[in-house]
Image (spheres, helix red, strand yellow):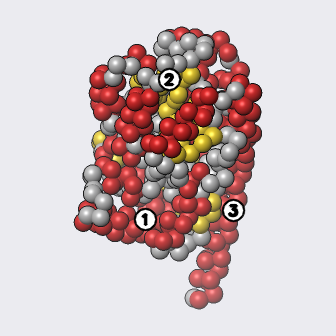
Amino acid sequence: MRIGLMTDAYYPQIGGVSTSTSLLKEGLRRNGHDSFVVTTTDPDQPENEEHVFRVVSTPFLSSKRMALPFHPILGRQIAERGIDLVHTQTEFGIGNFGRLIAKKNDLPHIHTFHTLYEDWLNDQLRAKDGGLGRKLIHRYVRMESRRFCNSADIVIVPTEKTERVLRSYGISVPIRVIPTGIDLHRFYKATDNLEERHNLRRQYGVGDNDRLLLYVGRISQEKQIERLTLFIEKRMSLWPQIHFMLVGAGPAVSKVEEIISDSPHKDRIHYVGPVLMENVPQYYAAADLFLSASQSETQGLTYFEALACGLPLLVQEDACLDGVLNEENGISFHDESSFDLGLTRLLTETDEKRSLRSRAAVKKAHEYGVTAFVNKVLTVYEEAFALKESQSTDRRKSV
């Protein structure tokens, strides 16, 4: 089967969409399918890529990239290569290009809805609570999500939270909940490399008895990264053994760097910046706790990656964590006071309790392996082909 994965976000961008698309492409190929990615150009893209087509793009909001939906030459190249199914990963630019290819060639069209744009746009445009801006954003996101998703044959979402949101938008096509998988062995391997853990910690001045708190992901407003950094910075005088490390890139980097520059504890707050995808597991493996204040996640792949490395979670309450976070593997918070209580509890637990939390984290991550993810997606593909065949039969009968 020849499968075109269409996305505006792909490696070397760091984020859930690019990670999910990359894992799916490789997983499908391991299953004997000819999968390829159509995506945007990026200044830092690798020189030589296999099974990846890139189209000219320009910077967009929040360091994202955007391309036009019309690419006649690329369309002919894909037609010559042959394609059996289109799987879009984004709703704009390249996503629309994939939608047009599917419609023109009467191909099954699967769409994965990754991003809750309402939260993202509210943060990017700084829309005020209850204001006209928020109402207009809500109406726009609802309309565009409904338009795109209802053009697909089946929509995949990572959580029931996202399914509920889409149903409230008026999406009427079948929706299938499939949590995005992760390549667990990459993280298990990093955790076993104790020498690499020691070297990375030493590089940033983190001692063997210090506690390294980690955030991995986009450094952006919708992730509430300034809020999280300030929460930790304010408590560093009380906890001289803690360090905070941020891995990723995004439009809020200058704000984070300003907080670090103004802090008397700047030597214990480490902004690493973006790192190569293959090196990300090393940072999880070097840490002791994973933190996030985001409420804009559809799933939160970084949470699973952290769990796979045995890191307990201290994260903002969010419906996407239903079935993921439990009393054994972490703690959630909803405001600064509950953050303080959760951090205090995790920092003062006995070594035995910390070990139990780490084992519980790895056990939960095991439920989200990439093999199960790819197999579930393939089942949806089969369902889409059956739907197309049924529609063709109905059309023949009506002639």
User: Which residue in the protein does label 2 denote?
Assistant: 239
Name the kind of residue labelled 3 in the image.
Glu
The picture places residue 104, in percent across and down from the top left corner, at: 46, 65
Specify the quadrant of the image occupied by residue 336.
top left
Residue 196 pos. (x, y %): 62, 14
Left/right of residue 84 with respect to residue 250 in the rendered view:
right
**Earlier residue among tags 1 and 3:** 1
Q: Mark 3 points at which residue?
A: 382
User: Mark 1 Cα within 10 Å, few/some/many (few <14, many 20+)?
Assistant: some
How far across and how far down the image is residue 175, in percent?
Answer: 59, 66
Q: Work out whether 116 lies above or below 143.
A: above
Q: Is mark 1 on a helix, strand or loop?
A: helix
Alpha-carbon distance for marks 3 and 2? Answer: 54 Å
Mark 3 or mark 2: which is in front?
A: 2
Asked if labels 2 and 1 touch by Cβ distance under 8 angstroms, the answer is no
Residue beneath label 1, please? 145
Give the structural element (helix, strand or loop) at label 3: helix
**Between 10 and 28, the one nearer to me in the picture:** 10
Q: Residue 79, how many percent across, how many down?
A: 50, 54
Q: Give the residue displayed 70% in from the left and 55% down from the top.
A: 376
Mark 1 vs 2, N-terminal side: 1
Q: In which quarter of the image is residue 97?
A: bottom left
Whole-Å distance between the Cαs marked 1 and 2?
45 Å
Q: In this view, does 204 lie to the left or right of 41?
A: right
Q: Is residue 236 visible?
A: yes
